[in-house]
Image (cartoon, rainbow, N blue to C red):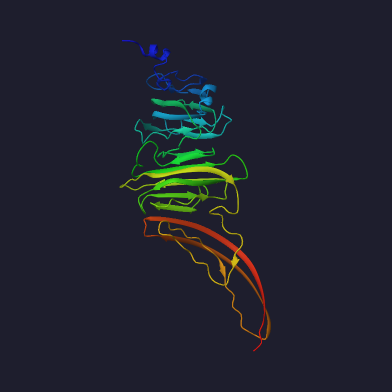
Amino acid sequence: MIPPLFFLLAGILPLSLVRADFGCVAENSIDSPITFSTNLQGLYDNSDKCTWNITVPDSAIAAGLACVSLSFNSFSTEILFDTLTVFDGPSQLSPVLTQLSGDRGSTPYALPRSIYSSGSTMFITFESDWSVARSGVEMNVDFISCLAPRGCQPNGTIIISTNNTIIDTNVGTASYANSMVCTWLVLIPFAGVCPSLSFLSFETEYLTDYFRVFLSATSSFSSATRSGQPRTGAAPITLNNPTMFIRFTSDASISLSGVRARLNFLPCSATNSYRPPTTAMPTSTPQSTTADANISDTTANTNLTNTSDTTTTSTTTLTSTSTSTSTSTATSASTYTSTSTSTSTSTSTLTSTSTSTS
C-alpha cells in the first residue's frame, strides 16, 4: 500500500486532509489547512498553556481565500477552568471572538459553532488548571473567502464585521433544520456607516419560523419581524445604528428553503428603513396605511389635523406637542407578515389666518 505522504507530496491528496497533532507546546504557527488538537493522545496535561498563530499565506489571499475558518471535531474540557480562547488577529491583544470550555462531545449540534476571522490572521490559546483533565479539543483550520456565507450555527452567535457578507439560514442544504435558534451579530469597525440587509430569497413557515432584526444583542424589542413567503420579495432592512443583531428561529415541524440575505454597510442616513421620523408632517387628512397582495408592511405615522370656525377676520395659532409610541403589525392573506416598530416625538406649530365675507 502506498503511504498517504506519497500522494501529498505528489499533489494528489488535498491539503485540507492533512493532520498535524503537535500537542500542546508554547507556540505553534499554522499557514495551511490542517487538523490539530490540544493533546497528542489520551488526556491533556494539567497546567497546560499552548498557542497557535494562524496566518493566511499570500498564495491563498491571491486566490481570494483571505479569511480563517475554525471548526471543531470534538470538544471536552473542564468547564470554566480549562478554556480555549480565539482572537480575531495575530495575538492575545486582538479582539476576542469567543472563549469556550466544557464537555461538548463530538455530536455536530452539540459542538461549538465554526468561528471566522475578519482578516488574514487568527490566534488561539488553550490553558488548563492544576486539576481535572479531559480528552481536549480537535480543530480544523481552513482558508475561506471573507465573503463566504455565514450559515446558521446553533450553538453561538456568528460575529460579522465584513461588508458584502451573505447571511444564510442554511448553507449547503435545501432547507433549514427544525427547532433551530441561530444568531448573527453585526459589528461595523468604522464610523459613519450603518448595516443594511437586502434579501435574495425568503421562505419560512408562516407565523411559526421567524427572522427578526434588533438594534443590538441586548434589545428587548425587534426592529423588524418577518415570516412567510413573499411573492414579490422581502423589502430591505436598514438600521440607523452601528450594530445589528439577527435572530432566526424555527419550530419542530415543516422546514422550507429559508432566508438568504446580503449584508452591506451604507452611509447612515435619515432615509434608513427603520429610523424613527424626527419631524411630524402636518396634513389635513390622515395618511392611510397600504399593503399590496404580496407583502404586508405597515408604517406608523403621526398626523396633525386642524379645524377652524369661519369668522369675518380671524387669526388662529395652534401649537401642538405630541409624543407617540406605536407598534403596528399587519398580516396579509398571502402568508407573509412583516412588523416594524417606531417611536417618534414631534412638535409642530401651525398659524392660520382666514377672511370670509358673509
108 in relation to 255, above or below: above
In the image, farthest residue toward the bottom = 358
Q: Quadrant of the N terminus?
A: top left
Residue drawn at point x = 61 percent, y = 40 percent: 190
Instruction: Give whichever of 200, 330 is nearer the camera.
Output: 200
287 in relation to 158, above or below: below
Instruction: Give whichever of 50, 181 is nearer the camera.
Output: 181
Instruction: Give whichever of 296, 243 is nearer the camera.
Output: 296
Give coordinates of residue 276: x percent, y percent: 56, 57
Residue drawn at point x = 49 percent, y = 50 percent: 236
Task: Please identify the quarter of the rendering in which residue 43 is found.
Answer: top left
Q: Quadrant of the C terminus?
A: bottom right
Give coordinates of residue 267: x percent, y percent: 60, 46
234 in relation to 189, above or below: below
Give coordinates of residue 53: x percent, y percent: 53, 23
Give coordinates of residue 264: x percent, y percent: 53, 43
Question: Would residue 237 be visible to someone looking at this image?
Answer: yes
Q: How many marks?
A: 0
Question: Would residue 82 be visible to someone looking at this image?
Answer: no
3 in relation to 126, above or below: above
